[in-house]
C-alpha cells in the first residue's frame, strides 16, 4: 500500500454569541482537516490544531512541507514517517506549528492502518477500556453571561448526567501581567479576580458536593495570583487547576504544584515530548494534558502517556475543536492505562455535533462508548462539510 495524495479541508462556523476564556476571544470555530489517500482506496482522516493563526498558514505547512515527504510511502511505517516529517522540517521548530501539522497527518495514517486491518483504532493501540467518562467543558465568558447564568449552565450539565465539569477563570484585567491585555478583543466579557471567586462558588452551589469541578486559567496568572485565588476557593473542593501560568514558566508551575493540595493540570499548549518531559520531571504538573491534534498526533501522545505512566501520573487530554479531535483523542485515551476521562466541549459548534454521519453523544450516565468500526470508525457528513467549507482564510480581527 502506498500514499497517493494528501489533501486538506478548511471549515468555519461563526458563532451567534462570541465566547472567551482567560485570554482568547472566540467569535468562530475553525477547523483544518487532513485526508491521506492510498492506492488501495483507503482515505485516512485527521485534524491539525489551527489555534493562534489562520487556517491558510497551517495548510501551507501540511501541503508544502509534509506532503512531499509522504507521497509514495507506506502508511504502515507511521513511526518512520513521523520522524521524517519532524526532522526534514526541524529548523521550523520542534514545537508550535510543525507538530500541530504533523498531528493531522499522523492521525490520518493511524486511521488508514485501522481501516486496512479492519480493526477499531483503540483496539489496535491497546484497548485498555471501551467506554470513557466525559466531563462538561464549559463555563466560558460571554457578553450575556454573568454569575447567575454560569451557575444555571452547570446545573443543567449535572441534570443531564455529567459527574465532572470544568469552567473558565482568569479573564481579569486587574491582573497586571495577564496576557489578555495584548489579545484580540481584550475588552470583551471582562471579570475581576474577586468576581471569578464568586463564579466558582456559584457553580459549586449549583452542582452540589458530588460533582467534580475543575477550573482552567489558560496561562493567565502568576504563581502569586494563583495562590491568592486558590486560598479564596479552598473550601470549594476543586478537582484540578489547569494551566495557571504560562507554559514556559515550568518553575512557577512547579511552585504552585508543591504548595497546593489541588492537582495542577497541563499543559495543552506544550507541543513537544521534550517539553512534557521537563514538566513531568520537574514536578510541575500532577495531571498531564497532551492533545492528539496539537502535540504531534497519536504517535507522540502515546510516548507522552508512557512517560506520565512511568511517573504514576494520570493523562487527561485537552480536547477542544471538532468531532475529529474528539474521536481521535477518544481512541488514544481508551488505549492507555492512565487515562479514562474525556473533555467534551459544551459550546454550540456544528463542526463537533454535526460533522459525522453518527454524532458522538454522551449517555445519560455521563459516559461515551468507543465505536467498533475500523480505524477512527466515523464518516464525514458531506452536507455539513459543504455548508461550512471555506476556500481562503482572512486575517483575524
Image (cartoon, rainbow, N blue to C red):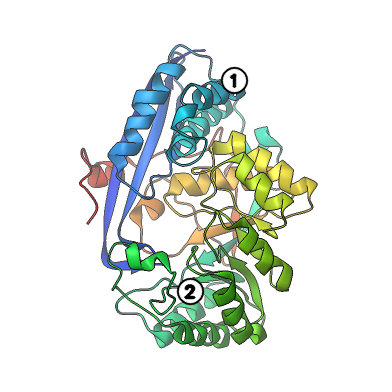
Q: Which of 119/180 is in front?
A: 180
**Label 1 environment density (alpha carbons within 10 Å; few <14, some 14–19, many ≥20):** few
Residue 169 numbered tag: 2
Q: Position of residue 351 (x, y in %)?
A: 36, 51
**Label 2 environment density (alpha carbons within 10 Å; few <14, some 14–19, many ≥20):** many
Q: Position of residue 295 (x, y in %)?
A: 54, 42
Q: Is residue 254 left or right of residue 345?
A: right
Q: Is residue 312 left or right of residue 256?
A: right
Q: Is residue 263 left or right of residue 6?
A: right
Q: Is residue 257 left or right of residue 359?
A: right
Q: Quadrant of the C terminus?
A: bottom left
Q: Which of 65/220 is in front?
A: 220
Q: Quick check: 1 above or below 196?
A: above
The kind of secondary structure element at disc 2 is: loop
Residue 119 numbered tag: none
Q: Are marks 2 and 1 in contact (CB under 8 Å)?
A: no
Q: Quick check: 98 above or below 317?
A: above
Q: Position of residue 100 (x, y in %)?
A: 46, 39
Which residue appears at 57% of the width and 55% of the height?
267
Disc 2 versus disc 1: distance between alpha carbons?
41 Å
Residue 80 numbered tag: 1
Q: Position of residue 263 (x, y in %)?
A: 69, 67
Q: Is residue 140 visible?
A: yes
Mark 2 or mark 1: which comes first in sequence? 1
Amino acid at each position: 500500500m502506498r500514499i497517493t495524495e494528501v489533501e486538506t479541508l478548511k471549515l468555519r462556523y461563526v458563532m451567534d454569541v462570541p465566547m472567551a476564556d482567560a485570554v482568547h476571544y472566540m467569535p468562530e470555530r475553525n477547523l483544518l482537516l487532513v485526508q491521506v489517500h492510498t492506492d488501495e482506496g483507503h482515505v485516512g482522516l485527521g485534524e491539525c490544531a489551527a489555534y493562534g493563526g489562520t487556517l491558510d498558514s497551517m495548510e501551507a505547512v501540511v501541503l508544502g512541507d509534509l506532503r512531499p515527504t509522504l507521497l509514495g510511502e507506506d502508511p504502515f511505517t507511521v513511526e518512520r514517517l513521523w520522524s521524517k516529517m519532524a526532522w526534514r522540517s526541524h529548523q521550523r521548530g520542534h514545537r508550535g506549528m510543525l507538530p500541530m501539522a504533523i498531528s493531522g497527518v499522523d492521525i490520518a495514517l493511524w486511521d488508514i492502518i485501522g481501516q486496512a486491518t479492519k480493526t477499531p483504532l483503540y483496539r489496535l493501540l491497546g484497548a485498555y477500556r471501551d467506554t470513557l467518562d466525559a466531563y462538561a467543558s464549559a463555563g466560558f465568558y460571554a457578553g450575556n453571561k454573568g454569575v447567575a447564568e454560569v451557575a444555571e449552565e452547570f446545573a443543567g450539565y449535572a441534570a443531564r448526567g455529567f459527574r465532572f465539569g470544568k469552567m473558565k477563570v482568569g479573564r481579569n484585567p486587574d491582573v497586571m501581567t495577564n496576557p489578555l491585555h495584548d489579545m484580540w478583543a481584550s475588552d470583551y466579557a471582562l471579570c475581576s479576580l474577586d468576581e471569578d471567586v464568586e463564579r466558582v462558588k456559584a457553580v459549586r452551589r449549583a452542582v452540589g458536593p458530588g460533582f467534580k469541578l475543575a477550573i482552567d486559567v489558560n496561562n493567565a496568572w502568576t504563581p502569586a495570583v494563583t495562590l491568592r485565588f486558590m486560598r479564596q476557593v479552598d473550601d470549594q473542593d476543586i478537582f484540578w487547576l489547569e494551566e495557571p501560568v504560562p507554559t514556559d514558566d515550568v518553575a512557577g508551575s512547579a511552585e504552585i504544584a508543591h504548595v497546593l493540595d489541588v492537582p495542577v493540570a497541563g499543559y495543552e499548549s506544550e507541543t513537544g515530548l521534550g517539553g512534557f518531559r521537563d514538566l513531568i520531571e520537574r514536578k510541575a504538573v500532577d495531571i498531564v494534558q497532551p492533545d492528539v491534534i496539537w502535540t504531534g498526533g497519536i504517535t507522540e501522545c502515546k510516548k507522552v502517556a508512557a512517560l506520565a505512566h512511568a511517573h504514576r501520573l494520570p493523562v487527561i487530554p485537552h480536547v477542544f475543536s471538532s468531532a475529529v479531535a474528539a474521536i481521535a483523542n477518544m481512541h488514544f485515551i481508551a488505549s492507555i492505562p492512565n487515562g479514562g476521562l474525556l473533555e467534551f466541549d459544551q459550546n454550540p459548534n456544528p463542526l463537533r455535533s454535526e460533522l459525522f454521519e453518527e454524532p458522538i453523544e454522551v449517555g445519560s450516565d455521563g459516559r461515551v462508548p468507543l465505536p467498533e468500526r475500523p480505524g477512527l470508525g466515523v464518516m464525514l457528513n458531506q452536507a455539513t462539510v459543504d455548508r461550512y467549507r471555506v476556500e481562503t482564510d482572512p486575517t483575524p480581527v
